[in-house]
Image (cartoon, rainbow, N blue to C red):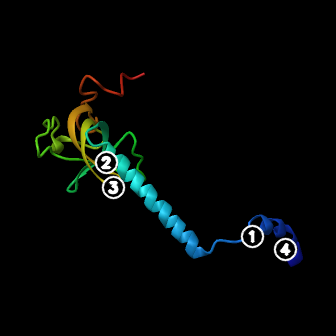
Amino acid sequence: MSSTIRTRTAPRRRALPDKINDDEIKRRYDDLSALAEELCAQRAEDRIGSFVDVLVDSVGREGVEGRAAHQAPEVDGSTSLIDDVDDRGGAGVDLAALRPGDLVRSRVVGSDGVDLMAVPLEMLSAATAGRGVTNVGAASPIGPPA
């Protein structure tokens, strides 16, 4: 059996004669991971000043967390909704009134790595659970039921 394995793998060895050692593989992986993180952080920083629609995921002692359209759950960072402490245009939405499922238009005011910080400006669509309100605001991306 060992001669069969050698015969079948010989052409592969000629095509790729030098196997890269584990230390080099780890170094290359770490370099590429660091580059990817840097590029993602730069992309998040480029969003400062822009407007994003944020779907609220959680409300708690840690604050209000959600996701903009470009942020997938658990892989692409998140958006923290914060009060406009510098009064750069005034927050039009009370953070204490937000609930999971609310959709709010927000202005990005900062970033931390891939995560964004944004000030909520307008409620686009309120979650219906416990509130009895839907499609608040004139510009709802959800639209009427089909």
Question: Disc 2 versus disc 4: distance between alpha carbons?
Answer: 53 Å
Residue on which the image places disc 4: 6
Q: Is residue 103 above or below residue 114?
A: above
Question: Disc 1 versus disc 3: distance between alpha carbons?
Answer: 40 Å
Residue on which the image places disc 2: 45
User: Would residue 145 appear left or right of 103 to someone viewing this image?
Assistant: right
Label 2: which secondary element: helix
Other-residue count near label 3 (Cα within 10 Å), few / some / many at <14 / 14–19 / ≥20? some
Of the numbered discs 3 and 2, the one sitting upstream in the chain is: 2
Q: Amino acid at mark 3?
A: Gly
Residue on which the image places disc 1: 17
Label 1: which secondary element: loop
Question: Closer to the camera: disc 1 or disc 2?
Answer: 1
Of the numbered discs 1 and 2, the one sitting upstream in the chain is: 1
Whether residues under marks 1 and 2 lie with C-beta atoms below 8 angstroms apart, the answer is no
Of the numbered discs 1 and 3, the one sitting upstream in the chain is: 1
Quadrant that contains the N terminus: bottom right
Q: Amino acid at mark 4?
A: Arg
Between 41 and 128, the one lying in front of the other is 41
Q: Amino acid at mark 2?
A: Glu
Question: Closer to the camera: disc 3 or disc 2?
Answer: 2
Label 4: which secondary element: helix
Residue on which the image places disc 3: 113
Question: Closer to the camera: disc 1 or disc 3?
Answer: 1
Between 9 and 105, the one lying in front of the other is 9
Q: Is residue 32 above or below residue 85?
A: below
Of the numbered discs 4 and 3, the one sitting upstream in the chain is: 4
Q: Amino acid at mark 1?
A: Pro
